[in-house]
Amino acid sequence: MMVCRICSTHWFMLVIYFAARTVCGKLTSGSTPILLIVTHHKSGTVAARMLYEHITEKNNSYVFLLEDGLKSMWEDQLRLRHGKPFAIHVIRHPLDMLISGYNYHKACSEMAWTNCSVDKYGGTRRGNSRFPDFFPLKYNYCLKLQNMSLSLGLQAEMIRSLYAQDGIGKMFHNMNSFKRYLPVDRILNICLEDLHNNNITTIERLTQFLIPWNTYQKRVHIADRIDHHSKTDTNINAQLFYDMAWDIVKRNIHVNFLKTFPCSSKYKEALDLL
């Protein structure tokens, strides 16, 4: 009985070993490199999915869609001397992410977490990537935003996005990781607004970047989409709303990061205050 148990244990370890070797080999070798399409909550998940579907039409198993940013496995992959992946990072100006997130969550748009009135996490949202571990929330998030003043609601959404596992803070962290560990020819930052507007220069850069994955024969085209979650309540003065949101962004993100951020905001009037 003991012999069988030892044999089965060794067999299990062999299976794990060869499975790991196969995965690692796929990630680090071969003529087709690994491509990561990375995005974050409210930075362009729909556009990233469309891009992923475009690239994987022919069942391209070397392309991975990461909708909540880089996980630890891929962070480790970036640090390798050989076999580094390529990455397309779909990003968005923090002001636009804040405004879109506030309106989207205030409307209780995602029932699974914005409109959940039962606190399943013992007073905090630990274990839910949408919230920081320390985020106290004994009531559902969307009703909380609806009952807050505009200023407090925007501040709550800013804190949520900065410290959650999939928001503004994670976007900045991933941008820094890509800049630190990937050669410049292996990372392509794509601004969501440029994809929405089918910016010619952006589309050409994207098309050229995708040549190794056999998508060059079909021009990349992301359909123009309106972000309905950027529209504010008609009872709120729009300019006041944008100015208040911009003030909160500036209080939480260093001005140098904002000045050098590669994407512009659609709320140009508010940005003139910088």
Image (cartoon, rainbow, N blue to C red):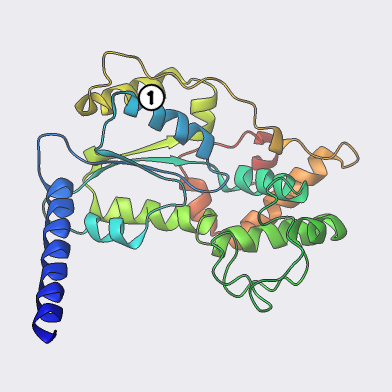
Please state the horizontal and vertical placement of residue 122, each as a whole percent of the image: 66, 79
Horizontal side of residue 250 vs 65, given as left or right: right
- For badge 1, the amino acid type reads His
| Relative vertical location of residue 210 with respect to residue 2 in this rendering, above or below | above
Please state the horizontal and vertical placement of residue 160, each as a whole percent of the image: 63, 62
Residue 251 visible within the image: no
Residue 11 visible within the image: yes
**How many marks do you count on the picture?**
1
Horizontal side of residue 132 vs 194, given as left or right: right
Instruction: Name the image quarter holding the N terminus.
Output: bottom left
Please state the horizontal and vertical placement of residue 194, each as a whole percent of the image: 49, 27
Residue depicted at 74% across the width and 44% down the height? 242
Residue assigned mark 1: 54
Residue 220 quadrant = top left
Q: Residues within 10 Å of mark 1 (few under 14, many from 20)?
A: some
Q: Nearer the viewer, residue 192 or 8?
A: 8
Horizontal side of residue 53 vs 247, given as left or right: left
Element under label 1? Answer: helix
Extreme residue toward the bottom, this view:
2
